[in-house]
Every structure is written in structure tokens, then in C-alpha cells.
Amino acid sequence: MIDSLPAVIIEPEQEANASIIWLHGLGANGHDFEPIVPNLNLKQGCHPRFIFPHAPSIPVSMNMGYVMPAWFDVVGLDGGGRSINSHQLLASAMEVHRLIDIEIEKGIDSESIILVGFSQGGAVNYQAGLTYDKPLAGLLALSSFFPTAAEVIPHPANQNLPILVCHGTVDPVLNITLAEKSLEALKRMGYQPKYLTYPMAHSVCPQQILDISDWLNAQL
């Protein structure tokens, strides 16, 4: 078995036939989105294993070096974007690849594996999902941004990856323009992302959970 990040793992009542790897945001942990699982109303016959990994605790420059769970260091705001430690982001994306590999080892087809990420977690998953060398079922970015858009080289296996981008119209942490820039970058690469917005801040809302449920059911 491959060594991997510690994670909260929720097994389905029946044998798993899909996997959803869900990354949390800065300062949170794998338990953050655990309560959403019972509200997803997945269709009959869909039995995903949920993997909610915990980010390592590292100093975060933007927060005066305070040590907290983070997928990568954020140095500061940068012209409406983010100045980040890209090496740490790439390392985190490789950890996501390891999690995918483990699910495949367990018998899950790569095309039944979905990546979900909130905020920092979404930034990591943009990199991880587009560059994985086997086709995935989908990529869901929640209130996130795409800091490696200018450098990423998508793998041909995921050139047709279904992508859903969700963002709050009044997000004070990651302005909605960052979601729009992500969409523009994805379209330039040939992707056809679906885009949904909500009158919310840097969070998740009930309507969004319904939309996420519909999208997951469509992909799995």
C-alpha cells in the first residue's frame, strides 16, 4: 500500500464503486465537509467512498507565520490574486495523485473518481486533476482559484475532464473575479467548465449542495 496523507474516510454501506476525494481549505481539516455527505442524495447504485484528507500544518506567511493546516503557503495578496509557494502546491497535488492511486489499487476505476476542493483545496485539485495520467470522472472547484493556470500542462488522459466551478458573489476572501479568471484559463485549454454562482460569502449554501448532488449524480 502506498503511504498517503491522513484522512477521514467514509465507507458506503455497500461495496464502494466510486471515490470522491475532497480537499478542505486553509486552516480547516478533513472533518470540515464531512457533515455534507448525508445531504448529497446520491442516486441508487452509486456507492462512493469519501476521502477527506488532512493538510499538514505549516507556517502561513500571510497570517504572520502562524502554523495551521495548509496545502501550501500563501505569501500575500497579489493584485487580486494570490502569491503562493508553488512548490508546496505541486507537492500537495502529488499527494492527491497518491490518493487516487490508492483508490485504483482498491479496485475503483479511475473514471469513477471525482476530485472536490474548497478554496486552497480547489487550487491543488486544479493541478492534480488536469495532470493525472488516467481519465477521472470530474473536478469540482468550490470558492477557489487556479494559481498554476499559466504553467500547468494538462495530461491528454484528462483533456475532456468534466469541471464544475462554484463561487459566491460576495466572497471577501477570494473575489469572484478569481473564479472568472479560472474559467477563462480552462476555456483557453479547451475545457468546457460549468459555472454556478450563489449570493454567499466564502462558504457553502443549501442550494449549492443540491447542485453539487445533481452534478455528482451526472458524473458517476
Image (tube, grey):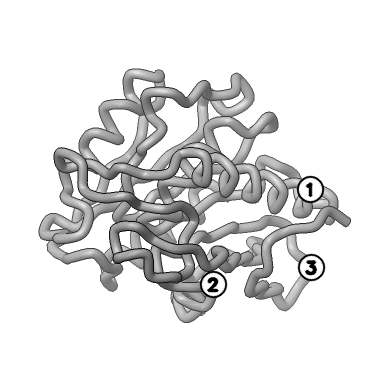
Q: Amino acid at mark 2?
A: Gly
Q: Which mark is residue 30?
A: 2
Measured in 3D between alpha carbons, the distance from the residue under mark 2 to the one under mark 3, in whole angstroms, is 22 Å
Instruction: Return the x and y of residue 117 as percentages of the image width and height.
Output: 45, 55
Give the distance between the C-alpha atoms of the residues marked 2 and 1, in whole angstroms.
21 Å
Identify the element where label 3 is drawn: loop
Q: Amino acid at mark 1?
A: Ile
Query: In this rendering, is residue 90 above or below 34?
Result: above
Number of labels in the image equals 3
Mark 3 Cα within 10 Å, few/some/many (few <14, many 20+)? Answer: few
Q: Name the residue: 54% across, 50% down.
A: 115
Residue tagged 3: 15
Mark 3 vs mark 1: in front: 1
| Residue 28 in the figure: left or right of residue 105 | left
Query: For residue 8, what is the image quadrant?
Result: bottom right
- First-in-chain label (2 vs 3): 3
- Residues at circles 2 and 3 in contact by the CB criterion of under 8 Å: no
Name the element at disc 1: helix
Does residue 9 sit above or below 139 in this rendering? below
Q: Are marks 3 and 1 in contact (CB under 8 Å)?
A: no
Q: Give the spatial CA distance, label 3 vs label 1.
A: 14 Å
User: Where residue 38 sits in the image (x, y, percent)?
Assistant: 51, 79
Q: Residue at x 75, y 53 (%)?
A: 103
Q: Amino acid at mark 3?
A: Glu
Mark 3 or mark 1: whose residue is earlier in sequence: 3
Query: Residue 42, relative to residue 125: is it above or below?
Result: below
- Foreground pick, 191 / 84: 84
Q: Who is closer to the viewer here, 23 or 71?
A: 71
Task: Residue under label 1, please give it.
Answer: 104
